[in-house]
Amino acid sequence: MNTPAIASQYKYPLDIVEYFVATYGEQRTLRLLSSLKSPGKHYTIRANTLRADLATIIERLESRGIKVLQHREVEEALLIPVEGPFDVPREGKRVIADKYAAESVMIGSHLYAPGVLKAEEVKKGDQVYITDVFDQVVGFGVAEMDGSEMGAGRKGLAVRVEVAAYKVPSLRELPEHAEGLIYEQSLPSMVVSRVLDPQPGDYILDMCAAPGGKATHIAQLTRNQATVVALDHSKARIAKLRENVVRLGAYSIRPIRSDSRYVYEDFPFFVKPNKILIDPPCSALGVRPKLYETSTLKDVEACAEYQKQFFRAAVKVLRSRGIIVYSTCTFTRHENEQLIEQVVEELGLELVEQGFVLGSSGEYEDPVLSAKVQRFYPDVHDVTGYFIAKLKKKD
């Protein structure tokens, strides 16, 4: 099977498929892309022990008929079995959803008005099937409003989904969510905070914090006994971070709206952190379920240059011998191993052992270096694709 055929079948840019095939080989590429199409066997949430103990949270979820498995190494990670795939009827009128809305519907979410791209002649009460722009069917249900009321800038429930390709409990509708007992977070994302190894008394900077998954996890691990300065430049995202801080009781977090690439200029009297978390915007090639991909290698290269800017700012404010943990939800070496090589060489950083490893070794030619980073692959670990590195400032 040639690369254009793979790109066409999985709906990926050709240069990304060529990169995957050159890196992993054709058969492994097919396994990777196929695994990315599904949400995996389990959906992961974090039990927030700032609000209740683990046993209570698990008991409350199970009392609602939700089957919960506790992860062996990350005790706060709760695994909920994903049901499916199911056959979704292609019946009634068609509603076309944007990529992210369609991927949410695919795992059982209802479709809301802002996520609708097209709903011609749809009337409230009609049976409809939901597709992405490539006509991949993800859900079937009943329209809750006319098609003319759906689309960007609109509000409200557009389609009540009755059948989806996969089924995950509607966790955000539970009282346990409103009370801050649970937070939807992937297992590799939780591993990042464990690698950072936050301790009471630490002064930690989270450079790309919103909506707050890792920052609130750090607060949980330290029982609110470490200071976490959480920066994000987006007004909407920092508002969501503040909301999560309150909901989860993570009061050791100080949310600040700021572009952290300029933290040393904007806050000249900033208390130097001893630990920094950099989880920057990336190409997100490891996120699942993924109906299709639009990022090209040019986008990947632009991401890598952008990510490097956070490192340049971080080393200016980090204390001597301080720690940086870097993570992405993508596969490319441009944004991962190659970027780490560059910042180690240019910025006086040293790659160090992580101390908490659940993933595979990295993709360096040198096995010693590879052992110091970890990767998660959906076809191997059945989780989101992820990369984690831990570095120390030399002076």
Image (spheres, grey):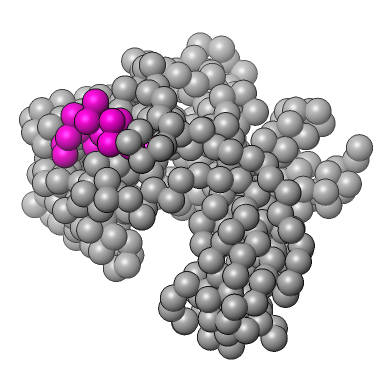
Q: Is residue 19 visible?
A: yes
Q: Residue at x 58, y 59 (%)?
A: 162
Q: Residue at x 62, y 23 (%)?
A: 380
Where residue 2 appears, x then y in whole percent? Answer: 90, 40
Q: Is residue 270 above or below residue 274?
A: below
**Nearer to us in this view, 316 or 84:** 84
In magenta stretch: residue 51: yes
What number of labels is visible?
A: 0
Q: Quadrant of residue 379?
A: top right
Where residue 61 appears, x then y in whole percent? Answer: 33, 37
Where residue 17 appears, x then y in whole percent? Answer: 76, 43
Q: Residue at x 67, y 70 (%)?
A: 128
In magenta stretch: residue 286: no
**Nearer to us in this view, 385 or 308:** 385
* Quadrant that contains the C terminus: top left
Q: Is residue 337 visible?
A: no
Does 353 sit left or right of 242 as displayed? Answer: right
- The span picked out in magenta is 45-61
Q: Residue furthest right?
A: 1
Where residue 32 appears, x then y in whole percent? Answer: 69, 34
Does 82 sit left or right of 27 as displayed? Answer: left
* Quadrant that contains the N terminus: top right
Q: Quadrant of residue 392?
A: top left
